[in-house]
Amino acid sequence: MTAKGFLTDTTVCIGCKACEVACKQWNQLPDDGFVFTGTSYDNTGDLGASTWRHVAFIERPGKHPTDGFADLSWFEGDEAPGAKPAFGPDPTGDFSWLMMSDVCKHCVHAGCLDVCPTGSIIRTEFESVYVQPDICNGCGMCVAACPFGVIDRREDDGRAWKCTLCYDRLKGGMEPACAKACPTDSIVFGDVDELRQIAEQRVATLHERGVEEAYLYGESAESQPGTGGLNAFFLLVDDPEYYNLPPDPVDPTVTVGDSWRAAAATGLAMVAAVVGVFVSIGKAGR
Amino acid sequence: MPGLGTSFGRGGATTFQQDLANSDCIVIEGSNMAECHPVGFQWVMEAKRRGATLIHVDPRFTRTSAVADIWVPLRAGTDIAFLGGLVNYVIENDRYFHDYVVNYTNANAIIREGFEDTEDLDGLFSGWEPDKGQYDPETWQYEGTEVAPSAGQKEMSAGAAEAARGEDVTHRQTDDSLQHERCVFQLLKRHYSRYTPEAVAEICGIDEELFLRVADELTTNSGPERTAAFCYAVGWTQHTVGVQYIRTASILQLLLGNMGRPGGGIMALRGHASIQGSTDIPTLYNLLPGYLPVPHADHDTSLDEYVAYNETATGYWSSMDAYLVSLLKAYFGDAARPDNDFCYDHLPRMSGDHSHMTTVTAMEDGLVEGYFIMGENPVVGSMHGALHRKAARNLRWCVVRDFAPTESAEFWRTGPEFDRGEVDPADCDTEVFFFPCAAHTEKDGAFTNTQRLLQWHEKAVEPPGDARSELWFMFHLGNRLKELYADSNDPKDRPIQDLAWDYPTDGAHDEPVAEEVLAEISGWKLNEDGEREYLSSYTELEADGSTVAGCWIYTGAYAEGRNLPARRTPWWEQNWIAPEWAWAWPDNRRILYNRASAAPDGTPWSERKKYVWWNPDDEEWSSLGDSVDFVPGRPPDYHPEEGATGTDAIAGNSPFIMQADGKGWLFVPTGLLDGPLPTHYEPQESVTENLLYGQQCNPARIEWNRASNPYHRAFDDERFPHVLTTYRLTEHHTAGGMSRWVAWLSELMPELFCEISPQLADEVGVRNGEWVTIRTARGEIECRALVTERMRPVRVGRKRNRRWVHQVGLPYHWSYLGLVTGDTVNELIGFVADPNVSIQESKALTCAVERGKRSRGRRVVTSGPLVIDEERDA
Amino acid sequence: MTDDTPRFIGDQGRVGDAVGAEQQRDSGHDGYPAPGRTDHRRPSLAAEDGSPTYYDQPAIKEPVWIWSVPAYFYTGGVVAGAALIGAVAQLVDRDGYDGVVRRCRLLAAAGTALGTAFLVHDLGRPTRFLNMLRVFRPTSAMSMGSWTLAASSGTAAAAATLPSLGAPRLADAAGLAAGVLAPPLGTYTAVLVSDTAVPVWQSTRRAMPALFGASALSSATDALDLLDLDEHEERLTRRIGIVAKTGELAAAVTVERAAEDVHERVARPLREGLSGGLWRAAKLATATSLVLSLLPVPKRLRSLRRILSALAGTVGALATRFAVFHAGTASARDPRATFEPQRERSGGAGSVAARRVGAGTETQTGSV
Ligand SMILES: Nc1nc2c(c(=O)[nH]1)N[C@H]1C(S)=C(S)[C@@H](COP(=O)(O)OP(=O)(O)OC[C@H]3O[C@@H](n4cnc5c(=O)[nH]c(N)nc54)[C@H](O)[C@@H]3O)O[C@H]1N2
Ligand SMILES: Nc1nc2c(c(=O)[nH]1)N[C@H]1C(S)=C(S)[C@@H](COP(=O)(O)OP(=O)(O)OC[C@H]3O[C@@H](n4cnc5c(=O)[nH]c(N)nc54)[C@H](O)[C@@H]3O)O[C@H]1N2
Ligand code: SF4
Ligand code: SF4
Ligand code: SF4
Ligand code: SF4
Ligand code: SF4
Ligand SMILES: [Mo]
């Protein structure tokens, strides 16, 4: 079967969080606690064991020349000395409020899957990365291995959880709950090949309309060799870090060979050291 | 919604949200559509994908602004200045759609000699009666005739009943050159001449250039080839001049020729899932179903009198008697006969103002014994929570139907006044009956959504435990009352005895069959065999008692005995208009006044914006798929004969068929209590004096002057230096009954907060996330400060006096119960209202902000006036 | 701010922990950006040195492992060292080193049992620990380690118990097998931590096995040293200990360098905070142990020297494991440790982002 995945087009996201709630409802996930964070409109913070879709809100400050809010002198008088505040004809200056619905990326090389010692995490017929809850023993390896900080262990039941790409719904011929709920089609579900085309088209349109900073994140192995590309990829308009995405993530199993080689050398050294000492001392002198 | 009703003829959104995708420019003003109507917003995003310009005019930078091309951060409460500025721009720069304006609006009508404008009277119109505090609108009328409005205050136009009102609308004097000095166009021009870009900038606190950019976008995207749409919601209605906000947009859209055309119109975004339904079949004290007024005690003494007072001689409102008689037949069945005026006397009569806030003050005064609260949480959602609680404590009994005991059921023990021991629950004698209600998933029924679309929903699960539907409750309550009064001989009990109350029931709990109610609302007549023949349009209604219809505008929803609101053919199996998805009133029409999408001669204004057109060959109107909003078969060149009445008086070039003259009203000669033309007034509580007129506030606004409801000084009250506005968040629903008890929503917005600018945070000395207290004369609340650049101070005032004003934003969803709690924002807001619709001013007032948490408990209604200055000095 | 209901994430250890520790200290306040005109107006993107993060939220998840995991690292090290020494001793002089062999086998058997208990204790679902042996997955260090540990447990237990059951030859075979498994057992834990996205672990992947291997040997000699040894045995453990500890210290420096080479931010947990303290303590204790064992002392003080050195070495080995563990946690919490090295290295998504026109200039609100 062809790979299924998501294109999340952040330029049309309105931050309604319908995806986040639809996911919770479909998967009957518990709440994450009632905590006011003060970080814009984001009070759930990040993806985790009980939040599989998470909407990020980025209040990107205006980079107005005055950068002058700190200097309140303009604020007292009528004609501001020097700096004019950042609301001339375009009152936003270049202030913007970016919103982005984050999710498990269903990496082509998935760290979580590759390190799972129990085989609980599998790749499904939809090329998605799926945790089998009846097998996971909560070793926590996957949690540390995901380069995106997606999968997490739930405290109460001790198992690792993350987005299933709505495996149950796909089996039933339905699209994932989050995509279904998204009113603006910021989340597009489909065959990854097709999504890639749609996405490229969209980027071209955006560039035409002057949004030159639009680009795709993780759409291919070329652009993200460390993961072999993402089946759930993104259209962004600023550095990935703004969205809490790593600029060049790497599946740790890609590089872990270095470590095995070093371990082998160390092992030999250990043997050599011990043998050497024995040799230097000779037989037990009794 | 008399703003739209008086302008166009019907009080509903003039278009449907899907049509927004066809727009070339969408102005969202007075609404935060992305957050409050996220699903409908998909068509705005679709329009954007197709290249439309999106403009958001809002004091705050919201999730709507985030995807808008232009954001206009105006000062709350100044939209009439902004829109009036656009009207002025359009007229001064000749950007209006000339042929549209001359033919389809009342621009050419000549107004009576004695009319005086705000230009002449420093902010008042002629007819102001200071001692009564209201207008005598006589001088606002057309020269040569007197028309009645199709909405709003139907009776204000006349001193006495006059069945002939509007009969001679054909005698209306007009001037198609639009040059006559008393013609509406010239009056309009003069009225808005002082709304210059400079004045707009000074009043609204925005940049002139920004205003001009909006004006340019809007006008270049209007005309034969292009259309622009307006979307508004309660950011416009919750003001003491709210109706006139909508009127200003109506004028603008008429001038630009955007009404009745695809991608145009005014999208009134309604609130609750069926709030449109609850104005169509109203829960309002002064309306009967279908916008028929409730009879007045003093003069609507008989059916004939009532009809005489309320009908218009021309247009579709001329069949008012048929609508009312059909309603009475639905109410009283066989008991309603011609010889007893169809039981007209059973209808309750209105003896005065019984609007919500008036009723609450009466409650405070001990004048109200019992109170039903169903599907509402007024202690949180309505103004002045403390006053509400106090008033409720003066009731003898109170019924609350909700999912959980809300603050409105717990008023006798929950609230700041209890925390401080000012009130003892033991002293409250009110008996509260709490009934758990069934949710919409647990019952059959219909929602009428924001675009007048009736959508049927089926019961998915049985309600748990004792929970029952509203229908069940009302039906069985009615039966018990009937039983109780069955043997009474007292004439006052006759209405209950005569009430036709025989709905079939179903299931273990005797649930009335909801579809049967729909059938009755839609209506029928009996054939010779005594069998029902379901009606398909309100034009089939008769005044002789042969037809039954519970709400005439809904007639046709159950045509041929089919539940049309339950239709579910997706648009891709028909066309984008999707007439076979559910059913819209009137007559399943999606774009109202769509005759205006064709030129006077019946051809489309342009190929690009084609929607409805005249087919000379088969002598009929055609459309892309919508139902045509015009008299069937009426040719474009039809001219009514002199003295024509009823629908015969509607000319072939008069798309607004509910109006007495068939025209869109730029100038409202009758129907509104606060003037024929929108005028900028400051809110009741403002940071500035009115820069345009001596008259500070809407002269006709309703105040409740009582100790428990103190107001701030009209302006320059240094105790309350900031503008305060309140609103919603996507994550919660209104007073919270449906969201604060849901963990998945509560976690998304767990605490009450205010949004303030970094500048104000500096002034107050508060950091992001810390506590602040917000104070008005009514009370004070505490909340977290969310410091954000999305809030901007605005510069207000004339040239030399221009100063910076802070705006404070408060979402109002929290209160004392539920999974997440917080103070109640409406503790801050007093009772003051728009005269036409009694809607409170919760979108613009003044406040103070201080660092730290509030004192515990103090409320005006329990502690007496909060002497704020003294306390601060102490 | 005197606040009676602190409900910020800072207090709940969710996001607040993420808000850079230094920031918390500056503001002395729930994890909110410090006061002052520039800070509070940007609750968002605290742009330290212009490098963006998402409200200083961690970019990756903190490992969920608890104390028993570094404790296991240590125990596993002792087992590996002991099994290796035992096996070599057995080969060199089975009878002559019988005491060493026995003690080593005992240590290994006890260690594998204890270590397994530590590991099971850390599992979210301890009852399902046998699922570890459901699959054999070379990319998973934990899978490989589990198999190694299982085999080690079996051979160590056999080697320790079979002699008393009258099967000394089988026991010897088991002892040898345990010795063969010892180097992987002693180093796979280093591979395991490197097999994660945690910056300080991943970037030190080439150096860490040496540290863990050396530490395994040294901790085994220290453990033996704490038992009753004769002079000959003592000489043996002392020499192995000296070599191992020298190696351990050298490896520690290499680890630091490796982290530093990748990015200053990555190395930070080895200098600062709890992990930095532990790291320094580990080096100090190991060095002390080394110096002690090199110290020429009169014969009667030799066993005291042995004990003191062993204690210091044990402290050093434990501190090393805990330092590495906590460094990982701190590193995972610091989003810049994830972002900045990735941004700096060429290739990958970093360069795609760089394609973004004029990074850091205008992006208008949704001109879609
Ligand atoms: N998620 C969600 N959706 C809802 C609701 C809900 O509670 N939650 N409630 C429903 C209901 S009952 C209703 S009535 C609708 C209301 O829908 P909206 O009217 O869109 O909602 P509000 O948030 O009350 O106000 C809209 C905007 O008006 C702005 N505003 C305030 N004062 C002024 C002003 O003077 N002029 C202008 N131009 N703008 C101003 C506010 O900043 C706010 O952004 O939403 C409905 N939809
Ligand atoms: N400051 C400020 N105040 C405002 C506004 C504002 O913008 N600012 N907006 C105003 C507006 S537009 C509105 S609409 C009001 C809303 O104010 P309210 O209508 O008072 O508030 P809701 O929370 O919507 O109340 C609806 C209640 O009905 C219950 N309910 C839901 N379904 C059913 C049902 O089937 N049967 C029964 N019996 N109950 C049901 C819900 O649980 C909920 O408690 O608030 C107004 N107040
Ligand atoms: S590595 Fe992370 S992002 Fe990739 S599939 Fe696994 S959990 Fe998802
Ligand atoms: S926690 Fe579960 S899913 Fe994750 S690696 Fe361990 S066994 Fe696999
Ligand atoms: S695909 Fe399903 S499980 Fe994954 S985020 Fe969407 S709704 Fe949740
Ligand atoms: S549902 Fe769609 S628009 Fe709403 S927050 Fe999620 S991605 Fe954004
Ligand atoms: S809650 Fe209902 S009315 Fe409101 S946006 Fe969602 S679908 Fe539309
Ligand atoms: Mo509403």
Image (cartoon, grey):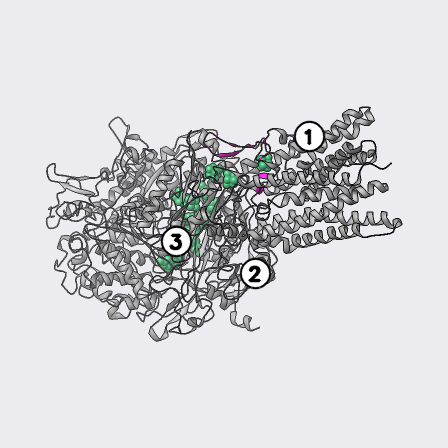
Q: Residues within 10 Å of mark 1 (few under 14, many from 20)?
A: some
In the rendered image of this protein, does residue C113 appear above or below residue B847? above
Q: Quadrant of the N terminus of chain C?
A: bottom right
Judge by depth and name the residue closer to the eye, A218 or C230. Answer: C230
Position of residue C151 measured from the top left corner of the image (x, y, whole percent): 69, 30
- Find numbered disc 2 in the image and state the secondary structure of the residue it sits on: loop
Residue named by callout 1:
C151
How far across and down, in percent of the image, does residue B469 sit?
A: 45, 37
Q: Chain of mark 1?
A: C
**Which residue position holds label 3?**
B66
Q: Amino acid at mark 1?
A: Ala
Q: CA distance from mark 1 to mark 2?
A: 70 Å
Residue B273 shows in this picture: no
Q: Which residues are magenta?
A: A116-144
Secondary-structure class at tag 1: helix
Answer with left or right where residue A27 lies relative to residue B491.
right
A279 part of magenta stretch? no
Taking the spot 26% from the left edge, 41% from the top edge, the residue there is B589
Q: Is residue B169 left or right of residue C46?
A: left
> Is residue B529 rendered to the left or right of residue A40?
left
Q: Which mark is residue B857?
A: 2
Q: Amino acid at mark 3?
A: Ala
